[in-house]
Amino acid sequence: MKNKLTLTMTASVLLLAAGCSSNQPSFDPSDTMVVSVKGKNYNIPKGAHPSPYVDNKVIKFYQKIGLKDCKKGDITWEEEKAKEEMGVAISKGDRSIYQKLAKEGRIGCASPVSK
């Protein structure tokens, strides 16, 4: 009886773990949504947020870290978890986090959507 209970509990935990891990949505930069920033519309990935501040210096920095398509007039965006990772890395003095996230497609730029 004790073995049956242990087996049932183990199976339940494994099923729960398998169900939770396989149903987690993953970030897909090609799955986009339209957001409005300062009266202009942009397509950014679902699960990403537009950066609150962008200027030519930021665009040049993004180009430098490998996002060559970024240009003046674009906004930048970050995936939510990437935003958290940047905060932790920067607090530790690690600026290479930007290149890593750019390479993974978890930060980027978006141009205004033409009408």
Image (cartoon, grey):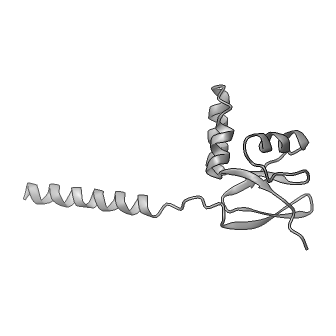
Query: In this orientation, which residue lies closer to the viewer: 67 or 76?
Result: 67
**Which of the image's four quarters has the C terminus?**
bottom right
Measured as percent of width and height from the top left, residue 11 is found at: 23, 60
Q: Which residue is drawn at 7% across and 59% down?
A: 1
Q: Which residue is drawn at 38% across and 63% down?
A: 19
Say above or below: 109 vs 31. Answer: above
- Judged from this view, the residue extending furthest toward the left is 1
Say above or below: 51 vs 33. Answer: above
Does any portion of residue 78 appear in the rendered image?
A: no
Say above or below: 86 vs 10. Answer: above
Left or right: residue 9 compared with residue 93: left
Measured as percent of width and height from the top left, residue 67 is found at: 75, 48
Measured as percent of width and height from the top left, residue 64 is found at: 77, 40
Numbered marks: total: 0
Q: Residue at x 16, y 58 (%)?
A: 7
- Give the quarter of the image for residue 33: bottom right
Q: Residue at x 29, y 58 (%)?
A: 14
- Judged from this view, the residue extending furthest toward the bottom is 115
Left or right: residue 75 compared with residue 106: right
- Give the quarter of the image for residue 39: bottom right
- Judged from this view, the residue extending furthest toward the top is 93
Left or right: residue 12 compared with residue 98: left
Query: In this orientation, which residue lies closer to the viewer: 63 or 37?
Result: 63
Does any portion of residue 31 appear in the rendered image?
A: yes
Measured as percent of width and height from the top left, residue 75 is found at: 83, 53
